[in-house]
Amino acid sequence: MTSPLAIYPTDLTSPQHALAFIDLLEHYARDPMGGGEGLADYARTHLVEQLKNLPTFHGALAFLGKKPVGLINCFTGFSTFSAKPLLNIHDLVVHADLRGQGIGQALLQWAEMQARQLGCCKLTLEILANNRPAMRSYERAGFAPYVLDPAAGQALLMQKYLQEV
């Protein structure tokens, strides 16, 4: 990295941030680990406006000079076992040309600081099982598989798409 890395809270009212946000999310969605297809037209058109009005959204953008190179999107949730909020990392994007240079770690540090400021008991995230580089990065940052009791096994993320009615 030639320019110093700067991390800024995502300001979706800023045209520069909104454009960087959509471009980086599109870059991620086109990656095999992001589904490989790009963002749906609906998401491209409505995401920024929807997130502007969502109080549980917490995000940051990483810049090298004026070039956007990464983003992290987080949402607050709640831990019933701890009776405290938690912060879920929903997306972590580092431009493919710049991976392995500490940008992801800097964004994870930002998320941890944000979670502490919000009084959260933990950070959570999902990861695809074969995304080994990301797994190593998360482990370096202190993340571990979610296990309550080893006899019960590791938690798995499941989903169900809802059809429009």
Image (cartoon, rainbow, N blue to C red):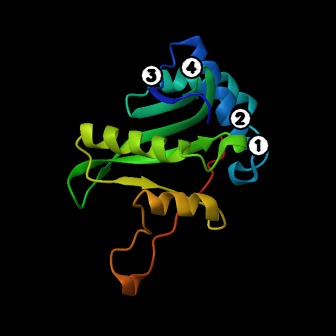
In the rendered image, the residue lying farthest to the front is: 2
Report the side of 114 relative to 47 (left or right).
left
Q: Determine the CA span between mark 3 and mark 2.
A: 21 Å
| Residue wearing tag 4 | 17
Check residue 26 in the rendering and tell me which mark sits there, or answer none.
2
Give the residue type that dot 4 points to: His
Check residue 53 in the rendering and tell me which mark sits there, or answer none.
3
For marks 3 and 2, the one nearer the N-term is 2
Q: Residue at x 45, y 40 (%)?
A: 74
Helix, strand or loop under label 1: helix
Mark 3 and mark 2 residues within 8 Å of each other at the beta carbon:
no
Report crowding for label 4: few under 14, some 14 to 19, many 20 or more residues within 10 A (C-alpha): some
For marks 4 and 1, the one nearer the N-term is 4
Q: Is residue 61 visible?
A: yes
Report the side of 90 relative to 100 (left or right).
left
Mark 2 and mark 1 residues within 8 Å of each other at the beta carbon:
yes
Check residue 30 in the rendering and tell me which mark sits there, or answer none.
1
Give the residue type that dot 1 points to: Arg
Q: Nearer the viewer, mark 1 or mark 3?
A: 1
Q: Position of residue 88 (x, y in %)?
A: 42, 48
Q: Nearer the viewer, residue 60 or 80?
A: 60
